[in-house]
Image (cartoon, rainbow, N blue to C red):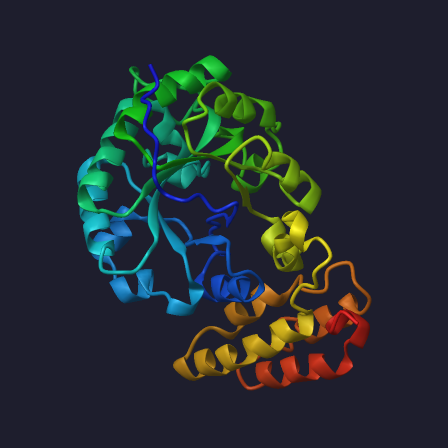
Amino acid sequence: MMEKYISNIKTPKISIAPMVDKSHRHFRYFCRLMNKEILLYTEMVTAQAILNGELDKILYFREEEGNVALQIAASNPEDAYKAVKKANSYNYSEINLNCGCPSDRVSGNLMGAALMSDRKLVYEILLAMKEATNKPITIKHRIGIDGTGIIQDKNAKVIMDGYDDLLEFLDTVSKAKPDRYTVHARSAILKGLSPKDNREVPPLDYDMVYKLKKDFSYLNIEINGGFKTLENIKDALTKVDGVMIGRASYEDCYLLANLHKLNEKNINSKSISRGEIIKSYIPYVVEEIEKGSNVHALAAPLQSLFQGEKGSRKFKQLLSSGNVKKETIVDILYNILEVMPPEVLWDL
């Protein structure tokens, strides 16, 4: 029987997914310029990296980033407990367990989506995380897995397919009382597909996630997978507690500036303009360049700011990797403010 635990944490309507090589702190700072309400995530960080690495390099983030969730990957309760204890000194708003990453490298170490094959272990890891902190502990997982060729444990559930299998997983996991379930509405194929293909090939099944919320209304459920427009986000929010945006946040990042329009009261209100976003980002770039931050990581979040708009080709040329250097990036950003079409730049 599913544990009837009603979390008292407030679920943000929108969060930005943890994405390897994308959700670094420069990306998060840039996202926060466009929207003050969303929950941001770190990239996935392994428990071993926290235990053995340079903590400030791995976990540091700026206060201006606002609410940020730390996502960790772990394969045993002991490492998870110690990692969360170490992370406690950083002001993350919550800590999330990754049970969704499909990459062979992660799954081969019984982390990410492969963890779903052993629901008792997931329960034990979540319990250890909760014992290590007073912060909310959440979980991100898939609706199912195909672990053929990866998972060798004879007692593990190599194939999880369908609603009943998902309920069997959650029946055990729920006993650890996670504060939120972020459900990627695709199964993960752990061998034979790249992480990129795992975001596209397995079919989306939103209805399974919506059914989960309908059948267990007390669970705090956020849906993830393929949300790219205000319309489909708005529809999903009528059925679950929150929506996690992934690729759209870097393929069409200005979507984040328009998320306030999900509230009917704000439907006709103006969004922060692209020009204002760039102007606000320049002082940050100056400061981070002086600290020695990677210039291409600083430029990357901007790449889709003019997606589909007049002047987008010119914008991408200016920000091309060949042009962007630590000596030129600031001048390029000021130049963009001069040469881009004013009606697009300032939303005239």
Residue 205 visible: no
Left or right of residue 124: residue 270: right
Residue 5 appears left or right of 222? left
Say if residue 4 shows up in the picture.
yes
The residue depicted at 20 percent of the width and 37 percent of the height is 128
Query: Which residue occupies the foreground of this view, 266 or 84?
Result: 266
Q: What percent of the width, then of the height, locates residue 262?
A: 64, 48
Q: Residue 4 location in percent, x, y?
A: 33, 23
Q: Is 38 placed above or below 292 here?
A: above
Query: Whole-percent x and y of residue 245?
Result: 56, 46
Residue 97, position in %: x, y? 34, 40
Q: In which quarter of the image is residue 310?
A: bottom right
Q: Could you tell me which quadrant the C terminus lies in?
A: bottom right
Is 336 above or below relative to 255? below
Q: How many numbered discs, if any?
A: 0
Q: Which of 325 and 224 is in front in this view?
A: 224
Residue at 19% x, 51% y is 85
Using the image as rendered, state which of residue 194 and residue 256 is in the foreground. 256
Q: Is residue 169 above or below residue 97?
A: above
Quarter of the image for the N terminus: give it: top left
Taking the spot 20% from the left edge, 55% from the top edge, the residue there is 86
Most extreme residue toward the front is: 265
